[in-house]
Image: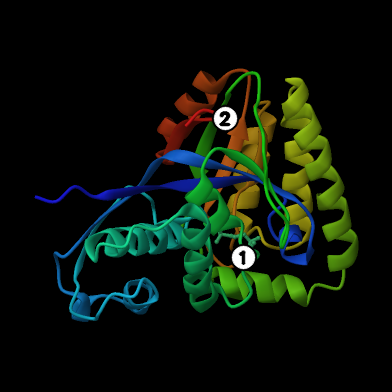
Amino acid sequence: MRSGVFIPGKVILAGEHAVVYGKPALAASLRLGVVVVAGEGNSSRENELVRKAITVAGGSEEIGVRIESELPVGAGLGSSAAVAAAIIQAVREYVGKPIGQDELFELTMKCERLAHGNPSGIDPATVVYGGLIVYTKGQPFERLAIKRPLKVLLVNTGKPQESTKEMVELVAKNPDKERLVEEIGELTKKIRQELIEGQEIGEFLDQNGRLLEELQVVGERARGLSRELRGMGAKVKITGAGGRGKGSGMMIALSPDLAKIKRWLDNKQITYLETKIGKV
Ligand code: PMV
């Protein structure tokens, strides 16, 4: 069996949606990810994104790929960017033309345009370069070294009904967009500073979460869950594009007593992932 290419998923800590309008966002790669083996499987049965990634890499349609993913799809954990990047790298290795990170970022971005319409590039940047980064559209990203890794829960609020593209379009029509984007941008800068200084980011993260609710990218179910978790002392914010009709994807929860939050979630049969940010 050929060895596969691993690309991690990602979580956006702060600044999603505002990043589309030129504000900075903070994102980290995860330990969970995608493994792709090129030269196996049948590409004719694959979806559009997979075929696009194979051709973008210069591979022919006959090159099949085998994809194994630990990332929930449509949950805001960067599944589409990670799948595209892993396919591109695996196909390039398969055809004997290994690819460097900058080119991998550019080609993954091409695939994201197919999936998203107007992507900021934060997903491809985080999954390709890895680590904890500050990303601003069109600028070189900044890598953050933080003193203590941050322990977080990623709580599943349910799969969004809408795509990232649809959520970005909804935000574009929001009459309060300009003010909210500005405020989210300012909060992201504060969170960056707190992380560098080794301070608690919970309060600012929670404020970012409330602004996303105001931006109307958080549905009723996730808002109810936020209220419950905040009532138990947690700081919460959805991560990624969100969702309005049904689920809103994953929600970051920070708490000095994560064990209590986990017991409550277990009781309610709400699923979650536990991960550390700032340490890959
Ligand atoms: O695809 P998601 O759920 O990780 O969201 C991407 C982040 C957005 O800011 C909503 C869109 C973008 O392209 O930056």
Picture residue at 87% right of the left edge, 46% below the top: 186
> In the rendered structure, which amino acid carries the disc numbered 2?
Gly
As drawn, 45 above or below 29:
below
> In the rendered structure, which amino acid carries the disc numbered 1?
Arg
Give the CA distance from mark 1 to mark 2: 30 Å
Number of numbered tags placed on the structure image: 2
Label 1: element kind: loop
Q: Would residue 157 be seen by someone viewing this image from the given angle?
A: no
The residue that mark 2 highlights is 278
Q: Which mark is residue 244?
A: 1
Q: Residue furthest left?
A: 1
Q: For this rendering, which residue is in front, 264 or 149?
A: 149
Instruction: Give residue 84's position: percent from left, percent from top.
Output: 40, 64
Specify whether tag 2 is near ligand 1 (CB below 8 Å).
no
Q: Would residue 19 be seen by someone viewing this image from the given angle?
A: yes
Picture residue at 25% right of the left edge, 80% below the top: 60
223 vs 127, left or right, is: right
Specify whether tag 1 is near ligand 1 (CB below 8 Å).
no
Q: Residue furthest right?
A: 179
Picture residue at 38% right of the left edge, 50% below the top: 71
- The local crowd at label 1, few if under 14, some if 14 to 19, many if 20 or more residues have their Cα within 10 Å, is many
- The local crowd at label 2, few if under 14, some if 14 to 19, many if 20 or more residues have their Cα within 10 Å, is many
